[in-house]
Amino acid sequence: MSENSVTAIASPNIAFIKYWGNRDPALRLPANASLSMTLSNLQTTTTVIFDDRLEADQIEIDGSPASAKAASRVTMHLDLIRTLSGVPAFASMRSQSNFPAGAGIASSASAFAALTAAASNAAGLELDKKQLSILARRGSGSAARSIFGGFVQLFSGEVNEDGYAEQLAPAEHWHLVDLIAVVTKEHKSTGSSAGHLLAPTSPIQAPRVQDAARRLETCKDAILQKDFRTLAQIVELDSNLMHSVMMTSEPPLLYLEPESISVMKHVTRWREAGLDVCYTIDAGPNVHCICSFEDSHEVEHQLRSIDGILDIYRCSPGNGVALTANNEQAPQ
Ligand code: DP6
């Protein structure tokens, strides 16, 4: 086959209603449905080319050859695409993010959304967004949501084909801001994939999952009606529930650092004082402060006065995955 070099760009997302635990770890079918906002400004750009002359996949992440662990995860995903497309060739993959991988921002979401779009297109597959979402989920659960922009829901799915995301509202619907307070840049010791496996060991996981549909509906309505106060309550409850599951699993997972708790307490006080702001935290210690655009500058100003915050990233609702315009469409 002639080589087709295809580049795709995707952004990470922050889950307002989180998934934690997989009902089927091999297929990455999540234990519960989830809802997120895709983030502007942060991007992963990935180029893939399948080449008959290669003797193995060549995988470069952020300018260096990928670690064995990262490379094997990418190769597994490329294998899925080789099976679906019937293209047997090895691939060269180059991926570059404009945010540090250790910053606690879900880089696997943007990475696998961009990889799925670039590699499936390079292999000649013509997938719609729903199919891309199903495939991206196989690489990383949250990547299924980064296929779409704005506000996005991921269904839990009984079987592979049901586990896809869809857009709830476009990015322009509501100008929320996510101020990500970075409190450590160290790589987390337990990644999400290992963490998901521990979820069923917590006595709180079953009730958390059981109540997830209700939380998701409340969150969805709050977004559609732009009701910040209801959104704030449900987002914080959902994040606290997930961290309770993490802390009560065997062995326990404690992602929060003293600085994370400090930001959480400040956010609660600021909201009581009238600012539209709430917190949510993924599988790491960094705190996402979700706020209205109107209050975001005041919140950022206040955040800068807290000790222990190393950096603040400002994001708005962003776009879903896209191929870049200059892809070489070599003749087949
Ligand atoms: C806490 O999508 O990172 O961010 O499939 O192992 O890559 P993998 O898991 P991942 O899990 C996301 C966990 C979360 C919550 C969420 O985004 O819903």
Image: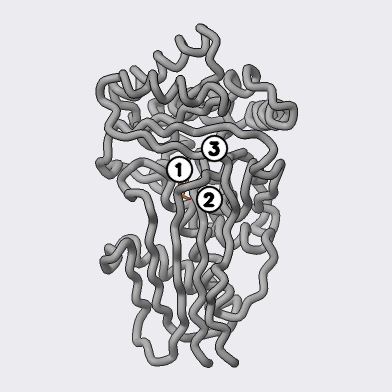
State whether residue 145 is above or below residue 276: below
Residue 29, image x and y in percent? 58, 50
Give the Cα distance between marks 3 and 1. Answer: 15 Å
Disc marking residue 15? 3
Within the image, what quadrant is residue 282 found in?
top left
Mark 2 C-beta to ligand 1 under 8 Å: yes
Mark 1 C-beta to ligand 1 under 8 Å: yes
Q: Are marks 3 and 2 in contact (CB under 8 Å)?
A: no
State whether residue 27 is above or below residue 194: below
Which mark sits nearer the N-terminus, 3 or 2?
3
Mark 3 C-beta to ligand 1 under 8 Å: yes
Question: 233 or 308, which lies in front?
Answer: 308
- Going by the numbered disc 2, the residue's amino acid type is Gly
Q: Residue at image x 69%, y 44%? A: 170
The mark lying in front, picked from 1 and 2, is 2
Query: Residue beneath label 1, please?
Result: 196
Question: 149 or 68, which lies in front?
Answer: 149
Residue 138, image x and y in percent? 54, 59
Label 3: which secondary element: strand
Q: Residue at image x 53%, y 82%? A: 328
Query: Residue beneath label 2, please?
Result: 141
Q: Are marks 1 and 2 in contact (CB under 8 Å)?
A: yes
Give the Cα distance between marks 1 and 2. Answer: 10 Å
State whether residue 10 is above or below residue 84: above
Q: Residue at image x 41%, y 70%? A: 75
Going by the image, does 319 lie left or right of 46? right
- Going by the numbered disc 3, the residue's amino acid type is Ala
Within the image, what quadrant is residue 283 found in?
top left
